[in-house]
Amino acid sequence: MMPKNEEQLAILKDRSGGEIALKGVTAHARLNGLLAEVEVEQSYLNSQDTNIEAAYTFPLPFGAVLLGLEVEIAGKKLAGQVVERKEAERRYEDAVTDGDSAVMLEEAGPGIYTASLGNLMANESAVIRYRYGLLLNWQGDRLRFLLPTTIAPRYGDAEAAGLQPHQTPESSLMVEYPLDLIVDVEGELASAAIACPSHPIAMERTETGLRVRLDRKACLDRDFVLTLASDKVQSSCVVVQDGEGHVALASLRIPPVPELERQPLALKLVIDCSGSMGGVSIAQARKAGQAILDQLRPGDSFNVTLFGSEFKHFFRKMVPATARYITEAWNQIDRMDADLGGTEMEKALDAVFGLKGEDASGTVLLITDGEIHEHEKLVRRAEKSGHRVFVVGVGASVAETFLRKLANVTNGACELVAPQEGMSEFVLSQFHRMRQKRVGKLDITWPTSSHWQTALPESVFAGDTIHVFAGFDQVPTGDVRLAMDEGPSVVSAITPFENTQIPRIAAARRLGEISQTIADEASANQARALALQYQILSIWTNFLVIAERAEKADELPELHKVPQMLAAGWGGTGIGEACGVLSCATSSLDDLYTVASARHSRARAMSDVGMDKYDIPAFLRRQCDDDVPARSKRVMFSKKSSGSSGRVLERLSTYVDGMFGSSRSERLDSQSDDWSADTTPLVFVGNMEISLLTNLRQLSLPTTIEELVPWGLDDAVLCGLRSLSAKGYAEAKVVVAFIHALSESCLSSHFGRDFKRGILKSWKMMDPGSELDIVMREALKGVSTDAWNWWQEPVARIGESATLA
């Protein structure tokens, strides 16, 4: 079982004790119709006396499509290009190891992205500017624009969720990043009633509509939420040019459906009571839970489940919604707190799906902040459960992408509620959807035949908006019509429009659909080609900027992970004002510290030479974590903490203790401590990396074959390397070519990122030549983690005329 690597609560400085490189963020959004276009500018300054690589992982809203990247560095202003992912990674590493500057923007996971800025020189500043597009949706007469600013601490194993160590977000209690934000609301949206439940705002009229500004100092500690309300919501359809063809976007609002006789509701209410829900979030959850119980009617059935590290059903089975059971549940919800440890949501939902009642499927209403790492597996399990999952997301920094995906794939719906918003309105909205008759099969008709169209949703609710794209050779004229099995059709006239981004947003929607049905390499290649054609960042492509420098960096850059601001109110720390003022007194925060883990001797050796967990090979990172007793990993607090802040810290301690729970199985039993006698490739890589840790920024690789022997090299490999040396190839070049080829083999993921970069730089400096490189790649073609499978034939074939160097 993998360890629960909860985000660590970092303190003030980066790994080397230097100041944080990120100095602030500026955002400018433009809302016109149902399209939002947003430009975000991140400002960096390297105040250290050496070159660094700044790595910053940040969130984007659900459905956002990255459309552009621009970088200002080394006196240059450069535009980014979308490049195939592996090629982008190779070119980025080439630039960094050559001493040039580079920026790579990649999708790290659902809804989160990482910007890597390599070789930001001492005392140098840089700006990373990116643009994204986002389609907005009316839900009834309300529209919500959300700009996430931070990633709250997440429970679970980040590595198992696909995050690399440099991408994994870390939160700090002490850093503060200023936010400046402008939102221009244009067209008919400017006449809507506008409110901002997350920040104080000021508004002024402009020639194109309305400008919204922050009215007070703000920081990256909470989602910015702007709500618009109007009773003039209409459907629309626009068509724009796309090269030699055209793309239509139909934004259609589902009308009310006929009311039928009410059917009983089998409701399974699930409430997150993990430590991260402390404070405002659990207070929101109490209000929501009690408001939900008040909506139950005779004939309904229900149960309530609270979860954290463990789960608790209020009743052994589904019970009728009588006054007795509702009162009992109401009182238990009134007493609940965020004191159940870690967020083991998968176990809780599995148990909820198995609750017996007259309706085998039932309806789940989940109240949570959604802060877990491994949610893709959970979404798939929910999809197969036969349940509809409705979600109320609470807190200042909700995991929006996860919660919306969970609701969408189960034909439910998601509502996000900011801490200052009234809960009852959103609960009533969800209950209305639950009791609503499902809209039947949808069918859309265009005036002319399209040669592609994005999929229609399987389930929609009255008052919601659906967006459908279609591609045409000629401009379609006339009306688009959306028909349903029951209820009136929706008709909208197609209007010509000028916007160069709509075809790219359409391409991103098509990519998302293709990614759900990838069956073979041909379909993956089709998706990759589409992403490159429309310059869309995706799971197959990255944005890349290379800035060649007149004066190259001599050393490899020092990794500088930019920590997140701790989300306002997380774990009960207090929602504060709009710049994240914590409710805990400063003296109480000073009491917070993390006890150093009792590392395995191999991990201690790494630490002694300045290597932290992010440099350790993947298999050793897991091993070191599993060596440490749970009690030595928990976040500790001073005994002098008292009052409300002391209780908050104690609850956070319980939460972190829950994620490292001692009930997890130990993984080291199967790994012998006599590992030096092992000659598998995986152990060789680990031994080699540990032995070369002195200075990864100026890595010195071995120059003789004999130096490789103590690390566990197989006899067949030794024989092959010695044979090459005997044929006249310089021994140092044979060694570096071998190590480089091994780092590029299927074992690549087992090399630490910095170690692999050091090998690449050494290989470039040594320049062993293409002939040796080809031989090494062929000889290692069959290597695996536990077998060398050395192929001697390429070594035997190589010519005898090698030149000594």
Image: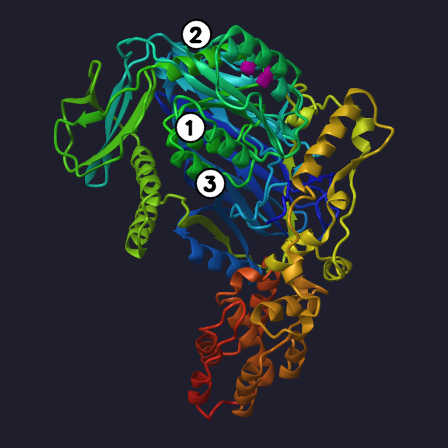
Q: Is residue 207 visible?
A: no
Magenta range is 284-289
Q: Quadrant of residue 606?
A: bottom right
Q: Is residue 513 visible?
A: yes
- The residue labelled by disc 2 is 298
Where is residue 154 shown, x and y percent of the image?
Answer: 60, 37
Magenta-drawn stretch contains 55: no
Kindly identify which residue carries mark 1.
407
Please name the amino acid that badge 3 sits on: Glu
Q: Residue furthest left?
A: 448
Does label 2 or label 3 sit earlier along the sequence?
2
Q: Residue at x 35, y 16 (%)?
A: 187
Q: Nearer the viewer, residue 67 or 625?
A: 625
Measured along the vertical axis of the image, is residue 546 above or below residue 580? below
Q: Measured from the top left, where is residue 641 in percent x and y?
A: 83, 27
Q: Is residue 725 above or below residue 241?
A: below
Mark 3 lies on a secondary structure that is: helix
Query: In this rendering, which labeled residue sits more in front, label 2 or label 3?
Result: 2
- The location of residue 795, given as percent across then percent down, is 46, 85
Q: Amino acid at mark 2?
A: Pro
> Which circle's residue, 1 or 3, is located before the other in the chain?
3
For this orientation, the residue located farthest to the right is 640
